[in-house]
Amino acid sequence: MSMKATRHIWHNGDIKPWHEATTHVMTHALHYGSSVFEGIRVYAVGGEPCGFRMREHLQRLYESARVYRMEIPWSLDALYDACRQVVLHNELSEAYLRPIAFRGYGSLGVAPSEPLPVEVAIGAVEWGAYLGAEARENGARVCISTWQRVAPNTVPAGAKAGGNYLSSQLISMEAHRLGYDEGIGLAPDGTLSEGAGENLFMVKHNVLITPPQASSILAGITRDTVMRLAHAMGIEVREQSLTRESLYLADELFFTGTAAEITPIRSVDDIDIGSGGRGPMTKQIQDAFFGLFDGRSEDRFGWLEPIRPASGASRRVAHAAA
């Protein structure tokens, strides 16, 4: 899960050197988790960097901000251009982008009486397979966490907010402490929810099954990608609640996520899943997904968005109209 820092970050409208993109220690988001963010992959397609469903990721950023009544002071088109800028300024052909919007410095009140400034930054880093190249090929070892996901109507799981990932940290740290690659959290009713930062899929009797949004999950864009690719390949897909023991009896399991991409699961709580490695349907879906970037699969859904615009990228973008 190695990540390599780059030279520049887009921060509040400017491209800045990495170490100059700073914020104040009294920033509201640092104290209360009042941030929303995204992860976006950029792949080299025919030698040129292409964002994967970049606009949809940014749209979700604005939707997450709306839940928390956070007004992002740049338009979606401006941030779309900024994502391009930060890739080009860092001369990257592949990258992981991290757009983040957060309430800045101004008051220590949990819900301040006056609106706080909202800052926005976009980092671009080189980041390989999230759970490791070996796990992507042969499957990850995972466990069921003792930490449950938050209940509906407590913290909104459908918003990709910084504070939500305190739960993810507990799940993942516990798994690592016990010697596993990742953990899976249960929903408050005891059914399956998702991994610490990944959605979960099961294959049983040639049917692809995933927990529904009501199971305290973030409905991931990679999750949607897999469901649409599977439909296109004639695979039956179901969203339904799943029990913990159904994991142990699955034919195949895999994680999805922007960072995790598509990662097989070879065992849960030290019980082998299927043959104890990557299953045939998982490989079929992996091939369709990664084939989008190496030319094996047609981009029939228009998910690839060229980073290098014909006219080049400007250094600064304007604020959205008031």
Image (spheres, grey):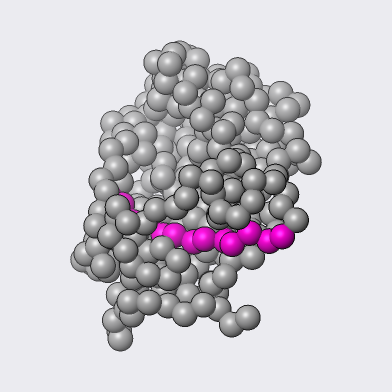
Q: Nearer the viewer, residue 133 or 149?
A: 149
* Quadrant the C terminus occupies: bottom right
Q: Is residue 43 left or right of residue 82?
A: left
Q: Residue 180 magenta-drawn?
A: no
Residue 88 is drawn in which quadrant?
A: bottom left
Tell me which segment is drawn in magenta: 114-126
**Residue 312: x percent and y percent?**
29, 81
- Name which residue lies at 43% across and 71% down: 13
- Name which residue lies at 32% across and 36% down: 1
Residue 32 is drawn in which quadrant?
A: top right
Q: Is residue 170 left or right of residue 211?
A: left
Q: Nearer the viewer, residue 261 or 84?
A: 84
Would you place residue 108 above or below residue 184 in this image? below
Instruction: Report if residue 163 is visible in the image.
Output: yes
- Name which residue lies at 50% across and 38% down: 197
**Residue 51: x percent and y percent?**
38, 64
Would you place residue 76 above or below residue 270 in this image? below
